[in-house]
Image (tube, coloured by chain):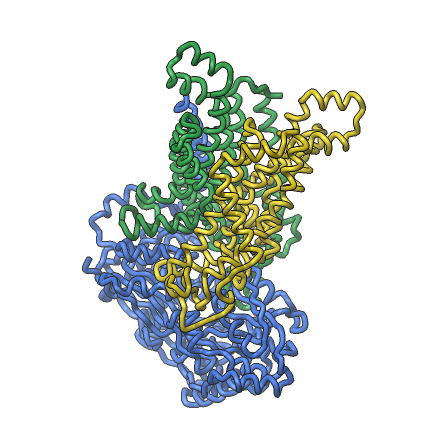
Amino acid sequence: MKQYVLKRLLNIIPIMLVVSIIVFMFIHLIPGDPARIVAGQKATLEEIEIMREKLGLNDPYIVQYKNFMVGVFSGNWGTSIKSNLPVWNVIVPRIKPTLILAIFSIIWSVVAGISMGVISAIKRGKLIDYIVMVGATSGISVPLFWLGLMLMQIFSVKLGWFPTTGVDSFSSYVLPSITLGAGITAMIARYTRSSMIEILKENYIRTSRAKGLHEFMVINKHALRNSLVDVITIVGLQFGFLLAGSVLVETVFAIPGLGRLLIDSILFRDYTVVQTVLLIFTFQFIIINLIVDVLYGIANPKIRYE
Amino acid sequence: MKKIVVLFMVILMTFSFVSCTNDTKQEETAANVEPNQENTEGKSEDVNMTIAVNAEIISLDPHNLSDTLSGSAADTMYESLYDYKLDMSLEPVLATGYSVSEDGLEYTFNIREGVTFHDGTELNAEAVKYNFDRVMDEEKNLRRRRNFLYVNSTEVIDEYTILIKLDSPFAPMINRIASLSVISPTALEEYGDQGILTNPVGTGPYTFEEWTPGDKMVVRANPNYWKEGPKIDTLTFKPVTENGARIAMLQTGEADYIYPMPTEQVKTVESDENIKVIEGPSTIARFTFLNMTKDIFSDVKVRQAINHAINKEAYAKVVKSGYAVPLTSHVPTTIEYQSPQPEYEYNVEKAKELMKEAGYPDGFATHIWAPNDTENMKGMQFISQQLAEIGIDVEVIPMEEGTLSDSIYSPQTPEESEVNMWYVSWSAFDIDGATTRLFHSSNIPPTSPNVSYYMSDEADKLMDAGATEVDPVKRAEIYAELQEVIWNDAPWIFLGSDVLLSAKRATTEGIFVDPSGGIIATEASTTK
Amino acid sequence: MKEIQYEDFKIESPFREFSRKFLKKKSAVISLAFLVFLLILVVFQPTPYDISAIDYDNILCEPNSDHLFGTDEYGRDVLSRIITGTRISLSVAIIAVTIGAIIGSILGIIAGYYGGLLESLIMRSCDVLFSFPGLLLAIGIVAIIGPGLTNVVIAISIYGIPTFTRIIRSSTLSIKELLYIEASKSIGVSDMRLLFKHIFPGTLPSLIVSYTMRMGTAIISAASLSFLGFGASPKNPDWGAMLSTGRDYIGVAPHMLFYPGLMIFLTVLAFNLLGDGLRDTLDPKLD
């Protein structure tokens, strides 16, 4: 186990290197000159040239990449091209909103998703199963931004229950989290259901039932515990979905988070910020995947690590 | 078990986030731009007003910004020697008057006495000079430097008098010199060029409170303001890019003022008694460049035919939801020296006739470029629909803004250029700014956006003459002639000039939008 | 239908059994009917109006007897545009998912069957692709190669590859462990034959299910790209593009936002429910 984790950790290094190259190429391959965008339409050619020189955009790509990597390792992440602030000062205030949004969404998805899945599995084939499952499937099928706008129209504008936008209070996060979590709730519900059905068929469940164990205990102790393995995998795999979804949800609800920062910075060709945010996103994603795999092992000791 | 595992996961995820947050905390400099939680609690009794805007504030350094919105935000804290009033005339602010030498090379300004910066520093000629030196520094390459390229040197005459010398006479100079915001020299020394971004110190009606880049900026009323100021405690600028969300904020009262008010949605708030929609003229011209080096657009008849084929009223109605007025020259009527030209009346038959004369009885195929936001796409589609009537098949090509500017400016010669039509807008304070960059033959890409590749000796001469002529009467004559030449050559499709729309709660007073789209909140007050 | 026959051959359960089981899944049957209905729309295009017929005097009309779904900002009939949009949205999704499925399955089978360095290489590349959260990869690709339908297709295909690779690899792995594969191998059946005759058909159930599910994702991704301004040309009545225009008119002409959104929602829902039904029918053990 220890060895496995160590191996996986070492594995991160080559992946991150490749990722850093892709991230670098990605932003530099997009047509568009940050110097010109930053300087604005009314800039003079001389002004743009000085800026290009200052930003190091005239250096060969390999030199720019080297500078980027040196910066990453020395902790000097550079200055935002767009705002002229240190990159960290741009990014740090953006972490909290995205984090809260992600956690809220995950919590409600896990709670709602598992409950829906379990109910559905127990009542398999009954009407309630159909309703819950069609409801859950709807959650994955609805375009996030559309759901967000509709929720905002109904609950903020018409009913006035929640603030429309912003992050000034926790109630501001309610609608965005519902929107963002809808898809994951649905995923979790579906996977919980199918793995529960699977497990309920297994011999040992039948045995426990035969032994006269209370149905609740059977479900809670044996079935659910085993289906959690799948649920963990899904939550982990869906984390990417969550971050990508945060781009859309943050746009709709005007939440100043990392997702929107990324889109804005891509549009502005703010190379330094885009590189850093993408690195954070991917690094965290890889780490979470690792954690998921380890948890997978803890929840299901049958799995051996090679 | 279920709960434990879930909890464990959440904790781990939180941890992985927080651990990267922690590292970063050490990196933060003195310029702390995080919102301060404790402070917000104590402020609950303050009267706050919120202005919701459609983009984020990019910079608060008034010498190093190029977008109107950042300018508006910075202007709550900074002031300049002279400023534009709502009717675009100049009004003295930190200066009390100025004089120009006869040769138009020396400008002398009298600085207002008794004004102090927010940090207590006195405003005097020395402080103004310090700002001129900063903005003109080639090494720093600040974005406002472009306005001062003609300035040779500045000189302190006495405590409250400053002399500015130009290399050559330049008529619109007063507009540009006067618009320089004055930053406290003490603060600049203390915080440096980067630190001043997050520690703005000016003389304006508000002092800096907090700014979270990408989120809100809060300023507080300046108790020591040198004239009558705002009647509120704090003012918040909040970027809300989604149009529907911005309106929703106004409807719920979370915002006191929104700009821009999306033209499409005026109907939704019309019946709401708590909301007032405000219209105002603008300096924004909307038009389409026709690349004259392309065969299809080289004949003036084709360009005139296109102008006749576009229904300008329908343009205003369909694309701007009625909130635009037709252009009567290449500059809107809000610009000084504008002189109205006879309209290109909407006449499809006449347009077809002109096309036939030009040798294109069956039209031709071409394409149009613009950024990929919905408003620009609407404009492009409209043009495409209208030109289909005279047989011109226009392919609509929306491009992401950065890509678009690359496609426009990377060709080094007119031959390499692939642009046919570019649907765009332009806004400037004076007629020189609204003309030279767009029509002078020296300003074709990659230098500047003369994307029509309009190269007319006659127009060039008039532009040069207008820029150096100091006598207003003669200037007016020159510019009238220039406008006629450009109008008849039709290097553009002349479409319209925006009517600026903002909206406020009925309780809001004292917030305005000037014709350039700048928000003025000097005298903000509310009865809420 | 083709896949189904293939399926029969492999699992050797008659087509009748499949349909008997499938017909029991009411939601899947209804979904299939809905998708067939969409297919009819795609083929016959029964649009009441010309989709580019502009009428500046009747812009943003609410739904009425002339225009069942109302008109848009140029006075064009929304219903007609949605019908035409079905063709665009579905073709984008089908082409993109097919490309992603083909490349992804090939990589997945290779990785699962051969293992070793090749597997590490393929799976690590997938990790790299996966480490760009979801849509961001598609956004990045479109940003580089420019907007437009073709590029949206390319972006969504690439973004679908790793999903298929992973799923197919894991089902290849489980099939490989089956006894008869070992047996065939030991009697010297060639790799190619094994792969195509035995392993690939074995992965089909999961492939069909993920293909169907992926259709939904692709439609939503295309719409999201359009929403963020990276999508199709506005002249095309693509659902996502209509939605993105419609949101400007949310308070004034909600029908412009509501109907295209509803169409996307229903179509994706149908694909997902169908996918569920297929999964249950094809292999109840599959998860």
Q: Which chain is green?
A: A
Res B528 → quadrant: bottom left
Q: Nearer the viewer, residue B313 or A266?
A: B313
- Residue A76 visible in this rendered orientation of the protein: no
Left or right: residue B72 compared with residue B383: left
Image position of B2 (left or right of B386): left
Q: Position of residue C49 (x, y in %)?
A: 49, 66
The relative height of residue A19 versus residue B133 in the rendered view (above or below) is above
Residue that lies at the very extreme toward the top in this rendered image = A211
Residue B512 falls left or right of residue C218: left
User: x%, y% of residue B404?
Assistant: 56, 63
Q: What residue do we see at 35% from left, 63% from top?
A: B265
Does residue B447 appear to the left or right of B15 in the view shown?
right
Residue A170 rendering spot, x and y as whole percentages = 31, 41
Q: Residue furthest left?
A: B527
Please tell me which residue lies in front, A157 or A171. Answer: A157
Q: Nearer the viewer, residue B173 or C254?
A: C254
Quadrant containing the N terminus of chain B is top left
Which of these two is toward me, B124 or B390?
Answer: B390
Q: Position of residue B497 (x, y in %)?
A: 42, 75
- Chain C on-screen colour: yellow
Asked if one can make out residue B321 in the rendered structure from this viewpoint, the answer is yes
Name the residue rendered at 25%, 54% in the picture: B48
- Would you place residue B310 above or below residue A293 in this image? below
Q: How many marks?
A: 0
Of all chains in the rendering, the one displayed in blue is B
